[in-house]
Image (cartoon, rainbow, N blue to C red):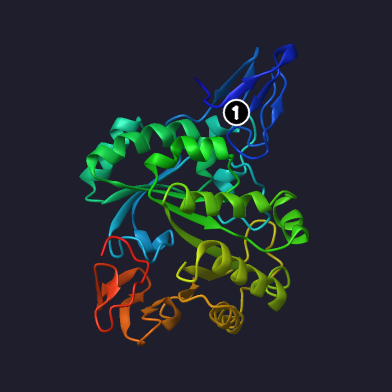
Amino acid sequence: MREAMLYEKLADKKVRCQVCAYRCVIPSGKNGVCQTRPNRDGTLYTLIYAEVSSAAADPIEKKPLYHFYPGTGVFSLGTFGCNFRCIHCQNYNISYVEPGTESLLPSHHLSPEEAIRLTKRQGCQGIAWTYNEPTIWFEYTYDCARLAKPQGLYTVYVTNGFITPEALDTIGPYLDAWRVDVKGFSTEFYKKLAHLAKWQTILDMAVRAKGKWGMHVEVVTNVIPALNDDEPQLKALAQWIVQALGAATPWHVTRFYPTAQLTNLPPTPVATLEKAMRIGKEAGLQFVYVGNVPTHTGENTYCPNCGQLDVERVGYRTRVLGVKAGKCTRCGTELNMRGV
């Protein structure tokens, strides 16, 4: 165990965690909602510092990030636990962790220094914290990110976005990309999916990541049949992206596959994803992508001005065809694309 960052000591040996937006008040002997941050006699600890459940050299497109160093490799790390309990979680085997059970799961200790060495040894251009929610792994991701930047590595949070301004502002100087899930666009949906009411925090923090810290932001929505695939909700979400983050912000509408507590639902019809893509473009978004449907042309980047195929993607194979200095080579239109 290691003492946590960003918490407040209260009366009667209680503490208030200031990392995620739940701001849990935790009595001595209890855990926060993430089940990884226990209060021991008035001191808050993290159980998962440097505890790695998953590590892989991934294509950056797998995060998915399509406008951020396309075609590069990113060393991807995950741990255990989450501050959400999404009923459709694809990684529920590591995110649905109860107190004490993390010791029963396969993991190994990886110091921040070794994580950076492995990133370079694997030939990756950056490091990402992903697979489960990186916010609850805050101390470790912060230490890694501070080491990564002087080494010329880019840094990525793949996140549900439910973070406090204090935590975001602490790690903000060391993060380059904020790949955020906006799972839906209604309180009813977030309550049903993640038992969450204060979902607007996610939107505010995405705006803060871009506006205050200059991070590259891409938004992902896993489109689930009969839950968040209705036109009004998709339209409202797309309009928010345009107004709050900008028309050039990539929006990934991805295919749901039955998993976790939603095995009763079918996979998302491709036609539904194409409808979401149309809704996004009609709302003014320049880059809307169909995800989890390999070989679909909705994975490609086309110039919104002249229509040139600028980046071709087939699964995780990427060819940059018409981009130079972030602009379309045919007409010079800015593509909001970093690293190429």
Q: Give the answer, above or below, for where 252 lies relative to 5.
A: below
Q: Give the answer, above or below, for where 269 lies relative to 133.
A: below
Question: At which x and y percent is residue 195?
Answer: 74, 50
Question: How many numbered discs sit on the rendered protein?
Answer: 1
- Badge 1 amino acid: Arg
Q: Which residue is drawn at 54% across and 54% down?
A: 207
Question: At which x and y percent is residue 175?
Answer: 40, 45
Question: At which x and y percent is residue 51?
Answer: 45, 32
Q: Residue at x 44, y 41 (%)?
A: 172
Which residue is the site of mark 1? 37
Q: Is mark 1 on a helix, strand or loop?
A: loop
Q: Which residue is drawn at 68% across and 52% down?
A: 199
- In the shown orientation, is residue 196 left or right of residue 202? right
Mark 1: give few (<14), some (14-19) or many (20+) Cα within 10 Å. many
Observer-nearest of 65 and 242: 242
Q: Quadrant of residue 21?
A: top right
Observer-nearest of 252 and 104: 252
Question: At which x and y percent is residue 296?
Answer: 44, 81
Q: Is residue 257 visible?
A: no
